[in-house]
Image: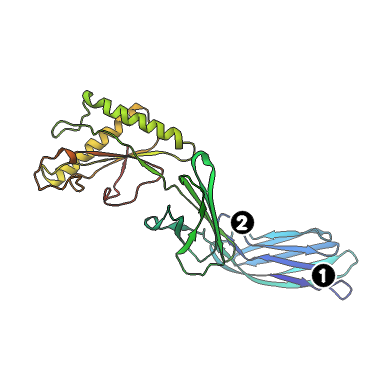
């Protein structure tokens, strides 16, 4: 809003201009009134928004703005009323009533449908907690270098918004998204879609047991070497987290197998912790619910007694290999 205050006929039309920021966002400033004087003198502004009173009084000089910030307003809309009085140095005075509505919006929350995230096609579907007007994307690769970017403006109010970016060759480690609503209030979201499955030879446990035998430690040491190589390559850009998933064959009942696979996954996770992995470690057992080799119930199949070691920056999504999201943190 931009208005001119005519103090008296003796003053120019631009004796005082008023600029209002009517929309603000929780955590990012507040609505405000800025007075831009065209004359020297004294200004007295008083405003009440509901139960809160605001005021600013002091000397003014031409071209030196004075701002009345409406701090502390709660979330939602507020009707504000008051007045502003100007006493010019030449003795001319004038008063103008003030009346305006202002809004404190909640933070603009952004979300991306990870199932629809197309890293190869460089597209994503973005949803906002209120209509999005424009979007900017920056993609970081190895070493934190920028390898891609994209921007789109003039968006329709419907969600989700389809956004595409351009990217040079390289693996996307972080996707940083900034979006603005119709009032140019921002929201931010960071995605880390990177993950890496560590190739390894599966640890063999004694029947019904979850203790890692000394004879199996070389297998874990080999996996550790691969983990360290990967973390050294990517760990300066993202927080590398380890996820250990355990599986069994179909010998025994399903509930017992799930418990056994959980204990074995935890034992492997604990070994990595003791070996020196200081990042977050999560584990989960899936029992016989995901078979590498389909078999009948009660079948002793070594290929189904396995584990998955996954390095990722975010919790992996639910899928055929990981059908549940019941991760436990070590």
Neighbour class for label 2 at 10 Å: few (<14), some, many (≥20)?
A: some
Residue farthest along the right direction in this orientation: 90
| Circle 2 residue | 29
Residue 17 visible in image: yes
Report whether 104 appears left or right of 314.
Answer: right
Question: Seen from this angle, which residue lies furthest left?
Answer: 298
Q: Position of residue 125 (x, y in %)?
A: 44, 60
Q: Which mark is residue 14?
A: 1
Element at badge 1? loop
Spot occupied by residue 277 in the image (x, y as percentages of width and height): 38, 31
Q: Is residue 301 above or below residue 53?
A: above
Q: Is residue 178 placed above or below 84 in the rendered structure? A: above
> Residue 150 at x, y = what percent?
54, 56
Q: Is residue 259 left or right of residue 121?
A: left
User: Can residue 278 be seen by looking at this rendering?
Assistant: no
Task: Name the residue: 44% across, 39% down.
Answer: 239
Q: Is residue 248 above or below residue 21?
A: above
Which residue lies most toward the bottom here? 9
Looking at marks 2 and 1 on the same chain, the residue that comes earlier in the sequence is marked by: 1
Distance in Å between CA atoms under marks 2 and 1: 28 Å
Report which quarter residue 280 is drawn in. Answer: top left
- Residue 116: x and y, percent? 39, 58
Front-most of residues 18 and 117 = 117
The residue under the point 22% across, 36% down is: 264
């Amino acid at each position: 809003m931009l208005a001119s205050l005519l103090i008296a006929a003796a003053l120019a039309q631009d004796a005082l201009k008023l600029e209002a920021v009517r929309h603000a966002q929780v955590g990012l400033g507040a609505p405000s009134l800025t007075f831009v004087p065209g004359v020297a003198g004294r200004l007295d502004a008083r405003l009440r928004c509901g139960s809160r009173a605001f005021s600013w009084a002091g000397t003014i000089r031409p071209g030196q703005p004075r701002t009345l910030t409406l701090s502390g307003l709660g979330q939602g809309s507020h009707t504000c009323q008051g007045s502003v009085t100007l006493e010019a140095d030449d003795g001319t005075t004038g008063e103008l009533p003030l009346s305006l509505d202002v809004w404190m919006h909640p933070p603009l929350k952004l979300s991306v449908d990870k199932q629809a995230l197309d890293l190869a096609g460089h597209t994503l579907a973005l949803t906002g907690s209120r209509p999005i007007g424009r979007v900017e994307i920056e993609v970081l690769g190895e070493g934190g270098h920028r390898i891609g970017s994209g921007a789109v403006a003039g968006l329709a109010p419907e969600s989700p918004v389809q956004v595409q970016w351009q990217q040079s060759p390289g693996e996307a480690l972080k996707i940083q998204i900034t979006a603005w609503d119709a009032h140019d209030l921002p929201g931010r979201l960071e995605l880390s879609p990177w993950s890496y499955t560590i190739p390894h030879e599966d640890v063999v446990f004694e029947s019904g047991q979850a203790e890692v035998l000394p004879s199996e430690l070389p297998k874990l040491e080999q996996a550790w070497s691969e983990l360290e190589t990967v973390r050294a390559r990517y760990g300066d850009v993202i927080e590398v987290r380890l996820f250990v998933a355990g599986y069994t064959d179909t010998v025994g009942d399903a509930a017992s197998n799930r418990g056994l696979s959980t204990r074995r996954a935890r034992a492997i996770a604990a070994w990595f912790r003791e070996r020196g992995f200081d990042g977050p470690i999560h584990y989960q057992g899936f029992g016989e619910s995901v078979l590498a080799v389909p078999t009948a119930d009660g079948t002793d199949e070594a290929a189904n007694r396995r584990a998955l070691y996954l390095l990722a920056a975010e919790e992996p999504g639910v899928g055929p290999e990981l059908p549940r999201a019941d991760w436990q943190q070590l």
